[in-house]
């Protein structure tokens, strides 16, 4: 699992080093995420936006997201995307306002992993994001 998700604190996971390029990668990622959902009552995911999935990996991710909407909505308190470039971050935030319905949990964009980890901890401690 640590290829895709690295535990930082209880309930807080950061994306690992493995890229998602193939369909098999996407399927392995969904199994790793299912493991997180099974083991945690609440969680925050910190994702490196530079590790966007390739087209082949995207299909199993989309199918998984649709199949797990209810459990994701119940357990994922926040997904934080780390985007270090301010212009790219602003563009992603703009796009997210149009695609927000695709995700059954709140999303946010931050400029550093340190900021993401602080927000993640506050989110779990206070049962809501402090953005």
Image: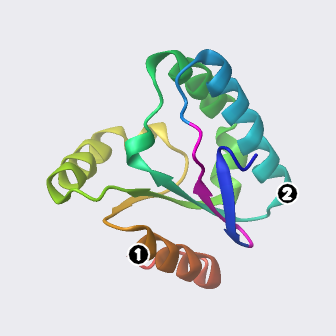
The residue located at (35%, 38%) in the rendering is: 99
Q: Secondary structure at mark 2?
A: helix
Residue furthest toward the right? 39
Residue closer to the observer: 10 or 96: 10
Residue closer to the observer: 106 or 19: 19
Q: CA distance from mark 1 to mark 2?
A: 25 Å
Residue closer to the observer: 52 or 45: 52
Q: Is residue 21 magenta?
A: no
Q: Which residue is mark 1?
A: 115
Q: Is residue 17 magenta?
A: yes
What x and y, as percent, mark residue 33?
Answer: 71, 44
What x and y, as percent, mark residue 105?
Answer: 54, 53
**Label 1 vs 2, first from the N-terminus:** 2
Pointer 2: residues within 10 angstroms few (<14), some, or many (20+)? few
Query: In this rendering, is residue 76 above or below 59?
Result: below
The residue located at (55%, 46%) in the rendering is: 104
72 lies left or right of 113: right
Answer whether labels 1 and 2 touch (C-beta < 8 Å): no
Magenta segment, which residues?
10-18
Q: Which residue is mark 2?
A: 39
Mark 1 against mark 2, which lies toward the viewer?
A: 1
The residue located at (31%, 65%) in the rendering is: 111
Q: Quadrant of residue 116?
A: bottom left
What x and y, as percent, mark residue 64?
Answer: 66, 29
């Amino acid at each position: 699992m640590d290829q895709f998700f690295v535990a930082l604190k209880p309930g807080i996971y950061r994306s690992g080093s493995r890229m998602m390029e193939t369909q098999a990668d996407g399927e392995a990622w969904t199994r790793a995420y299912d493991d997180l959902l099974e083991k945690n009552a609440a969680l925050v995911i910190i994702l490196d936006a530079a590790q966007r999935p390739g087209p082949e990996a995207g299909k199993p991710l989309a199918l998984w997201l649709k199949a797990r909407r209810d459990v994701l909505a119940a357990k994922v308190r926040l997904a934080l995307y780390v985007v270090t470039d301010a212009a790219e971050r602003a563009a992603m935030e703009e796009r997210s306002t149009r695609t927000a319905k695709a995700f059954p949990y709140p999303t946010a964009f931050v400029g550093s992993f340190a900021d993401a980890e602080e927000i993640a901890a506050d989110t779990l401690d206070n049962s809501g994001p402090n953005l």
